[in-house]
C-alpha cells in the first residue's frame, strides 16, 4: 500500500462493465510529508468516499482491489482503501 | 490503472491461439496533464477504443481478467475510454 494525494478525477462513459458506477480518482504518490511527489500519478477506484486534496492509502495490486470492490474475477487493479488523518513519524 | 493515448493499431496474423480476435492497440503512457511520459507499448482492448482516444489501462493478472476469455496470456488491457481528466498537479 502506498500514500497518495488525490489530485483529481477521471470520467469515462465507455468502460468495462465492472467500472460502471465506480468513482475513479487521480492519485499522486507522495512521500510521508504528504506533499512531495514520488512517481507518476495513476488512477484508482474509490471505496471510502475520498475527494480531491485527501491524503489516502492505495493498494496497487489486483487481489486487494478485487476483495474490496467486486467478485474474484473482476478486473480491478488499484483501489483507495483509506483516508489518512495523521502520520506520526518515529 | 494508468492513463494512455491510443497512437496506433497492431495487426498480428500469426499469434498464440488464445489471442485470436483480441484487438491490439499501440498506446503511449500519459501523465495527469495528458502529456506523453514514455515509450509506446501494446495493450489489448476491451472497449473499442481507437486512435486518438485517451484511455485507462490495467496491467498484471487483471489485464487478462478484463478479456472475454480470462485465461489468456496478456499483460496490459484497456478498460475505459476517458472523456475527461480534471487534475491539478502537485508543485
Image: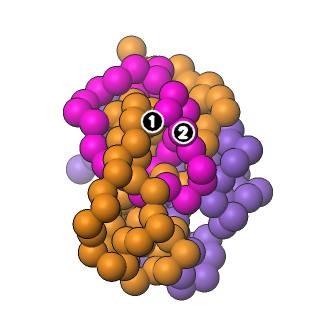
Q: Which residue is mark 1?
A: B6
| Secondary structure, magenta segment, majority class | loop
Q: Residue A76 in the image: state x and y as whole percent.
A: 52, 65
Q: Which chain is orange?
A: B
In the rendered structure, find residue B50 and report the number of the disc placed on it: 2
In the rendered structure, find residue B81 and report the number of the disc placed on it: none
Residue at image x 60%, y 29%?
Answer: B85
Q: Residue A61 in the image: state x and y as whole percent.
A: 38, 66
2 and 1 marks in contact (CB < 8 Å):
yes
Specify start and end residues of the magenta stretch as a single range. B31-57
Asked whether B33 falls inside the magenta stretch, the response is: yes
Residue at image x 40%, y 42%?
Answer: B9
Q: Residue B62 in the image: state x and y as whole percent.
A: 43, 69
Q: Which chain is purple?
A: A
As drawn, the residue found furthest toward the right would be A21
Is the residue B86 above or below the residue B29 in the image?
above
As drawn, the residue found furthest toward the front would be B13
> How many callouts does the rendering have?
2
Amino acid at each position: 500500500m502506498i500514500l497518495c494525494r488525490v489530485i483529481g478525477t477521471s470520467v469515462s462513459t465507455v468502460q468495462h462493465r465492472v467500472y460502471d458506477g465506480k468513482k475513479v480518482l487521480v492519485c499522486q504518490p507522495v512521500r510521508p510529508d504528504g506533499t512531495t511527489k514520488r512517481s507518476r500519478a495513476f488512477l484508482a477506484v474509490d471505496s471510502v468516499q475520498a475527494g480531491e486534496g485527501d491524503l489516502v492509502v492505495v493498494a496497487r495490486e489486483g487481489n486487494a482491489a478485487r476483495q474490496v470492490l467486486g467478485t474474484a474475477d473482476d478486473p480491478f487493479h488499484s483501489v483507495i482503501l483509506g483516508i489518512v488523518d495523521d502520520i506520526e513519524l518515529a | 490503472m494508468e492513463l494512455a493515448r491510443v497512437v496506433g493499431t497492431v495487426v498480428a496474423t500469426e499469434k498464440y491461439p488464445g489471442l485470436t480476435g483480441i484487438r491490439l492497440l499501440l498506446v503511449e503512457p500519459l501523465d495527469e496533464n495528458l502529456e506523453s511520459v514514455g515509450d509506446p507499448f501494446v495493450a489489448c482492448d476491451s472497449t473499442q477504443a481507437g486512435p486518438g482516444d485517451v484511455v485507462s489501462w490495467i496491467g498484471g493478472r487483471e489485464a487478462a481478467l478484463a478479456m472475454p476469455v480470462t485465461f489468456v496470456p496478456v499483460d496490459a488491457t484497456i478498460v475505459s475510454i476517458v472523456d475527461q481528466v480534471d487534475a491539478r498537479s502537485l508543485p
